[in-house]
Image: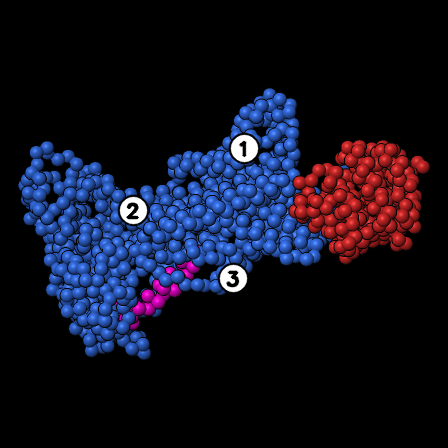
Chain colours: A red, B blue
Amino acid sequence: MILSMSAVTKSYQTAEGCLSILQGIDLDILAGETVALTGESGSGKSTLLHLAGGLDIVDTGTIVAHGVNITRFGEAERAEYRRTQAGLIFQQYNLIPSLTVKANLHFHAQLADRYDASWSDSLSAGLGLQGLLDRYPDQLSGGQQQRVAIGRTLAARPPLVLADEPTGNLDEATGDAVLEIMVSLCKAAGSSLLMVTHSTRLAAKLDRTITLKSGRILS
Amino acid sequence: MIKTTFLAVISHWRYRPIQLITLVTGIALATALWSGVQAINSEARASYARAASVLEQANLQQLITGDQQGIPVETYASLRQAGWKVSPVIEGTVRLGGKRIRLIGVDPLTMPQSNDAPLVKDASDLAEFIRAPGVILMSAETAAQLTDVQGLRIKLSPSVPEDAAFVDISVADRLLQRKGKVSRFVIAPDQSPSLPPIGKISPDLSIRAGGNGTDVSSLTDSFHLNLTAFGFLAFVVGLFIAYSAIGVTFSQRRGTFRTLRSLGVSLKSLTAILILELTVLALIAGSIGVAIGYVIASFLLPGVAATLQGLYGASVVGTLSFRAEWWLAGLAMALLGTAVASAQSIRQLWNMPILASAQARSLATGAERSLRVQAVLGLLLLSLAVLLTWVQGGLVTAFGILAALLLGAALMLPAVLAYTLGRAERWARKPIPRWFWADTRLQLPGLSLALMALLLALSANIGVGTMVSSFRTTFIGWLDQRLAAELYVTARTEEEAERLRAWLPSRVNTVLPIWSVDGDVLGKPVQIFGVADDATYRENWPVITGGDDVWDKIASGKGALVNEQMWRREGLKVGDRIALPGNFSVDVVGVYSDFGNPVGQVLVGLGAFGQHYPNAAKLRYGLRVQTSELDRVRSALIDDFGLPADAIVDQATLKRQSRAIFDQTFAVTGALNALTLAVAAFAMFSTLLALAASRLPQLAPLWAMGVRRRKLARLEVIRSVALWAATYFVSIPVGLALAWVLLAIVNVEAFGWRLPLMIFPIDWIYLGLAALGAALVSVYYPVRLLSKVAPAELLKVFTNER
């Protein structure tokens, strides 16, 4: 088991009062499994992803990753977890604008002390980035930037890849192509994938789909 | 529509109150230091004009002579007989109760009524003024310092400047021992139309036009130019804050501007509304700035007054009066400054497409282009500075060199930093250091103005500090040379001086007369001193040019030493012959340094001096005595001879007083330096605060990849300190170049003396520590905000929904 969530709840304080986002989530993801997380806007998909990635902390419940209960982690341990265990891919790419494509690709792997030149080279070849390595992110198209973001995460070979609508900003054809590459490279890296998406068409391309509604898992 | 748009535009400030405060503070600080300096300048100039009007009747025409001996009283009779309505004046410096004051003797019966001399109001005043023992009219401040007024009755008048006094002409004649020789005549404005020319009555006389600038005001021009330059520097530094704040607010409101335009607001209307907004802000900030400037000027004016007194002997009233013209000028500068600071943002607004969105890197690419342009411009300005140094030519050129040097260096700074950061990025092997240098380079365009402001402030501090310290060290060495005698005594009368001359030789090693007269040489007022042929001068006098036999030539009466300022001003060379008053011509045989003296000085042999100026006052003497004998000689002078204690000054006291005057003189410079640095620190603080808001999206991905907030905050501190440190190191050579220009060009042009450049690394360390402290203060709040940012805020960067 790469990730196990049990009875996880999460709420946020808003101007209108306490807003309950997740209400008792139980979820298991196996090693190498690819899982789509779907649901309406506001159903809690991104919050679940952030909790799984150690970006946020649960109100109640436990999250066990690689057999370790990460809900007990302090800030330093959560940072370590994000560096080495979970790789995050965002809809807005969130590349580092001051670094070249090449430096961005190597960045997370070097942080995690897992930099492997041949794996990075094969990733950039697989992602079709070889001619773009010396460019800066703002010199790339949206699809190219998202491929760099995927490469950056996979270069670190995290056991768990968490992707938050990675194709949300891309057109259908580009989105399909990016997803194909992401899934195949996750498999090659031996990483599990939990991907938030609105698209049932894209969700169907993964091993399993989980749907959230009002903070609860429907299926 | 206009009102709705205006309200939408200004609604930004409700969400960004700190930015509003920053912008207003920037404009206010720029205006404050500028208008503060202008207030001081206008007050000082008004003081000179008042003093000249009162003391010299400068608004009226005068008859003057080049003869140091004065104008014979017979000439007065001839002028009156010829129909000229003139009033005689006898003036000079007199020592009253241990204090030297300027004494002006006037004839109240003939003095034109329109003049500003505050003499008599009615017949009883007149009778009292001219009747024995006579009245001495002076300010309360001067009166408080006098212990002896030779039996005259003191009458106070607030309009008489400090260290000056009016008496009846007969009293002045007696006290100054002029024996009927008149100093000048004031010409009444209402003269008969058919008067014989002055040249026919007395060929030695010439007419000096009324309303001319006074000697003091022209002498102090350089000082005021200096102050103005400092005020302008602070104004530029303040403008950087405004420029930076305006740039940030415009970039943050891009979305609003696009929305407004897409909703049908024309570019012209939007621009007009933004200009209106900026004008209102400039007027509010300008008013605050002028008020702060008034407070700054009030604090600085006593120091400036002391400086002007110390450097030029110019008297300035130490209190500030409110003047509408500098209030208006301050507001005009605030408007002008805001216009300059906002020009680029307005231009960008005009070129901004409605739909495009700016990204950090594309903005940086644009900024890289402007970095290159700036660097080229900076290089051109530095070349211009070198060129101007080569050609030289007056004080304005000297300040041109300073401006080109500072602006050129400031413009080149971002390019130099960008290059250095690029190299550092290439050398970095690990991801965080590589990101750190690359990200710092990306931040550079946003920080460059604040860094340029910092460079200007630090360079000014190093440059002016080096100049002052070099001056101080040279001055103290020079004092040791000049004040070689152990004791200095001043007799109260010529009779007492004669007794002293007879009494002293058996009790001290050497008696060195300090006798002088004032006169015109080469058309300028100078002091002429007679010096004894003594080893004291041969061994100690600070001669900077002259052969080995300088003192032999002086002793023979054929040679003269001139001070450096006269030598430079008149372009004299060793061997030139100069005509001194009293038909006395001598060869210039050498030059000596003479700091702090605004007028020219000539040293001749004592024998020749006595021969040509038999009537010169012979009251002052330097005494060489063994240090162990000092107290005994002093006691004997007081107890046995009967000299008052305040007529004796020892060398140590004189040096202490001179150093105190020196330090007071540069206290204003120190205050302006500190203020400029404080403004630069505020510029950095406001910039970092503005940038902090846009830092989250840049830092959040790193946090998501496992870099802790604390580490990110620490890196932000290191970044700021690194940039401050880099700017500080660049400021050292720039500051030294500035010091060289000040010492070798500005001082020579302004004061007539050149000083050696000395290096004071300890001062740099203190400044570096002060800069580091300011860096930490400026970065503390923005970084604290960052380190305390809640994970929820960081998550917003990634979240489109919850």
Assign a secondary structure to mark 1. helix
Residue tagged 2: B217
Residue span colored magenta = B461-488
Q: Is residue B484 magenta?
A: yes
Q: Give the mark nearest the N terminus, 2 or 1.
A: 2
Assign a secondary structure to mark 2. helix
Residue tagged 3: B765
Assign a secondary structure to mark 3. helix
Question: Given contact means CB atoms under 8 Å apart, are the residues at marks 3 and 1 in contact?
Answer: no
- The answer to which of B655 and B125 lies nearer the viewer is B655
A175 left or right of B443? right
- The answer to which of A89 and B187 lies nearer the viewer is A89
The image quadrant of residue A37 is: top right
How many labels were placed on the picture? Answer: 3
- Mark 2 is on which residue type? Ser
Chain at tag 1: B
The image quadrant of residue B598 is: bottom left
The secondary structure that most of the magenta stretch takes on is helix
- Mark 1 is on which residue type? Ile
